[in-house]
């Protein structure tokens, strides 16, 4: 309400009705007030106005709006026009919306109906399938029962005949009785019948109930039956769910789940019937997951079954064969015990037939005494004949290389180092070797390592060729070499024997061709053949841990062809060939017999001398490697090697007469590790020695630090470093790690350290002699000798010996050294002095006192 005359009334509504009211107040005052009456809201019908009705068309004239005086103040015809147009548009929109909504509803309903139909069809099919299965099972069951009943009846009849007690009356057969009993139950839904069964349908009780009560009961019964049926089938159909008025309505998803379950159950029944019984290969121990794998069962189920047996294990833990066998039986499979060693059987060891064998290049090892020129000879041959078109094409030194002879034959040379420390490597080298070239310097003749090399070659039954080297030297005497060799049962051709001998000079290159020819000839005699078409096998001639490339092994293929991608096992390691690199540093796709290649893609660093075998699957390779690791460990333990720290300590204690310097060695290459170990073994004498607790290839790890700490040993890293965590734990545990890259420095340092263990040598130097002139007693001091220093000097701090008739009767120290009552440090020769011995009184005139000094001299190992 407003109290302002002539002003528009305030209000939120559309067009309010208004009028003027005159108000009278006391003292004759009056006031005209505009009264606003809000019009009731008229609900406009949603139906579109018919075209003929006023106000429906655009042509409606403004006069249609009625008397303008009756309109709310300030609304013009134009305004009315606009408003009416807006109203009409709104109405039209509403009508359109209604039509669209109706259409959408219809579509949705159709979709729902279609889906419902689909689900019902599916359900019906499922139900029919399950029903069919059940009917079949029941049919079988009934048939079996009937058969059993018939058998029983027949037996009864026979028995009665035998006993003569068969009753005269014709009792129906049990099967017939059963059928008769089943009859009333066969149709429980007979109208008016009690669903609880015929027993309760007493005819006398029925008339007491009114018609209405009976109807209600029938309804209840029907509902109960539906529910029971649903429960029995374990399945609720969409119809059932929708029919359950007021009951819990199930979501579509829930119903779907139920159907899935029913379907799975139906399928599951079928599956169980045809469960596959497997023969499970069972080694002495097996990892749970692998066991599950072999049974084709879920690992979680296997773990569960083990837990039931009281074994708390995880998937990755190994279990023994006996336990595994129980599990296998529980899952209904058959265990087939296999020996651990059987895993190696996958390695192809079939002998090649003659037609598959092709001739292969010989593998040659050069042996000989230090400095007789092995390396020079290898280098000379390589430089002159290496299989490379480029000048200086040797980019990679891989421990072996192939050369071409003038006659076109290929020869593979093993580049074995000539140092004495590599003796063990060399002996292994001889086992892959077809021919040994024994280098003997013409100026030096047969030396200890020449003899050793002869022994190796003979033991390996490898033919030898003698290369008499350094014939360019003025004092060369090849004949002496030949005669020297006779003493070692090596009779060269020049001496009418069968061992070829060639005079060469690595320096001038003289005779190198002859040497290669001699090798080719020898190879021909040996008829060296291999089958390049089979899975490769080869020998590791060198292995190292490369910083960028990981473990790398130089392998000499002995048979078959090694290809990129091949899966192999090598010693205790396995791998898949990632790359093959030949002796010239080129990447190759394959390597045939007698070809040396670097192999990348190993799981770890193998040892020189290990055999490489290609297998079919990674699982086989891994299994064999695991088996070999285990057997190696067992072997070490059986041999009494100190594998545990306790054993190490016990051993060290048992052998106390000799001081030991324990060390751990880690090197980059197997060859270096072996060389260092051999060098270390040579350090020491009867009193002290170096004990290599462990040596290996690769970075220094936590395990090494642990062993070093417990054994109080330093770790020696040769061209390798400790990894971060090993460094940290070494710092914490106070383990010393020393790094070297020069073997001589390492040997010197270890020698020095071992020398520290030597007891210091005590050296005595005589500094003087004194003769006792007289002996007198001094209170508080005891017997004092009055002496004359006859030679050298008498010193207070020195040691003294008392000689009587040149026999030592006492050795000790001085209590006092006096000159004229004064205590002095030293008394020179020709002077008199007083001397008293510490804790010794028996001194006589004429005795001689020998004065000496002792110094401790630290010894060092040679
Ligand atoms: N005059 C002459 N000197 C040679 C000949 N062959 C090797 N030498 C020299 O003999 C020395 C030793 O040669 P190496 O090739 O190192 O001998 P090695 O047997 O390999 O020695 P280790 O590796 O220490 O076992 C070197 O100084 C060579 O230069 C040769 O045919 N003639």
Image (spheres, rainbow, N blue to C red):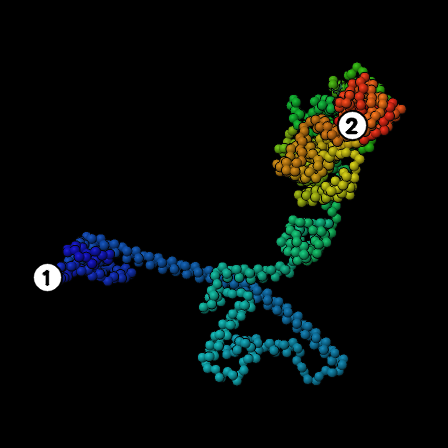
Who's the residue at 72% across and 41% down the image? Answer: 645
As drawn, 247 above or below 218? above
Residue matched to label 2 = 815
**Residue 153, how many percent across, how many down?**
70, 76
Q: Are marks 2 and 1 in contact (CB under 8 Å)?
A: no
Nearer to me, 170 or 755: 755
Who's the residue at 85% across and 21% down the image? Answer: 773
User: How crowded is the residue under tag 2: few (<14 C-alpha within 10 Å), some, or many (20+)?
Assistant: some
Outermost residue toward the left in this view: 28
Q: Is mark 1 within 8 Å of ligand 1?
A: no
Q: Is residue 170 left or right of residue 426?
A: left
**Quadrant, the N terminus:** bottom left
Who's the residue at 53% across and 61% down the image? Answer: 258
| For marks 2 and 1 on the same chain, the one whose residue lies earlier in the sequence | 1
Q: Is residue 308 left or right of residue 128?
A: right
- Quadrant in the rendering for residue 77: bottom left
> Which structural element holds mark 2?
strand
Q: CA distance from mark 2 to mark 1?
A: 151 Å
As drawn, 167 above or below 110? below
Q: Is mark 2 within 8 Å of ligand 1?
A: no
Who's the residue at 82% across and 22% down the image? Answer: 786
Q: Could you say which disc has been placed on residue 452 in the image?
A: none
**Residue 248, how many percent across, how many down?**
47, 66
Nearer to me, 516 or 342: 342
Q: Could you say which disc has been placed on residue 28 in the image?
A: 1
């Amino acid at each position: 309400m407003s109290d302002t005359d002539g002003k528009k009334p305030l209000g939120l509504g559309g067009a309010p009705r208004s009028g003027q009211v005159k108000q009278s107040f006391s003292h004759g005052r009056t006031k005209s007030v505009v009264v606003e009456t809000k019009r009731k809201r008229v609900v406009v019908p949603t139906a579109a106005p018919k075209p003929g009705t006023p106000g429906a068309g655009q042509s409606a004239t403004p006069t249609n709006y009625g008397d303008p005086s009756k309109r709310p103040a300030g609304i013009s015809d134009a305004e009315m026009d606009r408003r009416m147009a807006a109203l009409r548009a709104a109405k039209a929109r509403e009508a359109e919306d209604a039509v669209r909504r109706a259409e959408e509803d219809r579509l949705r309903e159709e979709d729902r109906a279609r889906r419902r139909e689909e689900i019902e069809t599916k359900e019906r099919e499922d139900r029919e399938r399950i029903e069919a299965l059940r009917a079949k099972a029941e049919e079988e069951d009934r048939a079996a029962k009937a058969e059993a009943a018939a058998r029983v009846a027949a037996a009864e009849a026979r028995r009665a005949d035998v006993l003569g007690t068969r009753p005269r009356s014709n009792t129906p057969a049990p099967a017939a009785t059963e059928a008769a009993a089943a009859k009333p139950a066969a149709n429980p839904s007979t109208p008016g019948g009690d669903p609880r069964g015929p027993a309760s349908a007493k005819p006398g009780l029925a008339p007491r109930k009114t018609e209405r009560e009976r109807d209600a009961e029938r309804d209840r019964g029907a509902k109960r039956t539906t529910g029971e049926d649903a429960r029995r089938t374990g399945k609720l159909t969409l119809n059932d769910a929708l029919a359950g008025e007021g009951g819990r309505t199930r979501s579509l998803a829930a119903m779907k789940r139920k159907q899935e379950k029913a379907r799975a159950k139906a399928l599951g029944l079928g599956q169980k019937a045809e469960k596959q019984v497997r023969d499970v290969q069972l080694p002495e121990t097996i990892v749970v997951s692998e066991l599950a794998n072999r049974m084709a069962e879920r690992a979680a189920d296997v773990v569960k079954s083990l837990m039931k047996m009281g074994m708390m294990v995880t998937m990755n833990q190994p279990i023994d064969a006996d336990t595994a066998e129980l599990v296998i039986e529980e899952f209904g499979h058959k265990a087939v015990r296999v020996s651990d060693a059987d895993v190696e059987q996958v390695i192809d060891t079939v002998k090649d037939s003659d037609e598959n064998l092709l001739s292969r290049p010989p593998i040659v090892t050069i042996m000989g005494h230090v400095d007789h020129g092995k390396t020079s000879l290898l280098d000379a041959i390589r430089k002159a004949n290496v299989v490379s078109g480029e000048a200086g094409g040797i980019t990679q030194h891989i421990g072996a290389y192939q050369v071409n002879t003038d006659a076109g034959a290929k020869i593979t040379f093993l580049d074995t180092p000539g140092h004495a420390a590599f003796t063990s490597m060399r002996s292994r080298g001889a086992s892959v070797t077809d021919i040994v070239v024994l280098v003997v310097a013409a100026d030096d003749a047969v030396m200890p390592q020449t003899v050793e090399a002869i022994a190796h070659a003979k033991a390996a039954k490898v033919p030898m060729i003698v290369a008499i080297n350094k014939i360019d030297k003025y004092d060369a005497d090849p004949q002496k070499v030949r005669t020297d060799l006779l003493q070692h049962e090596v009779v060269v051709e020049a001496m009418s024997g069968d061992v070829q001998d060639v005079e060469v000079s690595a320096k001038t290159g003289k005779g190198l061709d002859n040497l290669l020819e001699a090798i080719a000839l020898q190879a021909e005699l040996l008829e060296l053949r291999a089958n390049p078409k089979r899975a490769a096998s080869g020998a590791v001639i060198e292995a190292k841990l490369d910083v960028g490339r990981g473990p790398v092994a130089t392998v000499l293929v002995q048979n078959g062809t090694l290809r990129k991608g091949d899966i192999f096992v090598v010693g205790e390691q396995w791998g898949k060939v990632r790359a093959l690199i030949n002796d010239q540093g080129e990447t190759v796709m394959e390597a045939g017999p007698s070809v040396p290649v670097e192999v990348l893609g190993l799981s770890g660093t193998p040892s020189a001398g290990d055999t490489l075998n290609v297998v079919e699957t990674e699982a086989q390779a891994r299994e064999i490697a695991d088996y070999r690791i285990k057997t190696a460990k067992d072997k070490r333990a059986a041999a009494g090697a100190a594998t545990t720290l306790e054993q190490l300590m016990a051993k060290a204690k048992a052998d106390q007469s000799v001081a030991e310097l324990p060390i751990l060695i880690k090197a980059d290459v197997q060859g270096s590790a072996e060389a260092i170990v051999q060098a270390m073994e040579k350090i020491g004498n009867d009193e002290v020695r170096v004990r290599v607790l462990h040596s290996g290839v690769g970075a220094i790890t936590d395990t090494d630090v642990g062993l070093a700490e417990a054994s109080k040993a330093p770790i020696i890293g040769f061209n390798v470093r400790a990894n971060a965590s090993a460094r940290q734990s070494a710092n914490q545990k106070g383990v010393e790690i020393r790094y070297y890259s020069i073997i001589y420095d390492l040997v010197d340092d270890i020698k020095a350290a071992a020398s520290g263990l030597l007891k210091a040598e005590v050296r005595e130097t005589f500094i003087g002699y004194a003769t006792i002139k007289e002996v007198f007693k001094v209170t508080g001091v005891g017997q004092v000798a009055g002496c004359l220093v006859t030679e050298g000097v008498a010193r207070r701090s020195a040691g003294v010996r008392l000689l009587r008739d040149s026999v030592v009767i006492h050795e000790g120290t001085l209590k006092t050294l006096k000159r004229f009552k004064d205590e002095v440090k030293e008394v020179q020769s020709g002077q008199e002095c007083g001397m008293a011995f510490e804790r010794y009184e028996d001194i006589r005139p004429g005795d001689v006192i020998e004065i000496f000094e002792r110094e401790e001299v630290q010894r060092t190992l040679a």
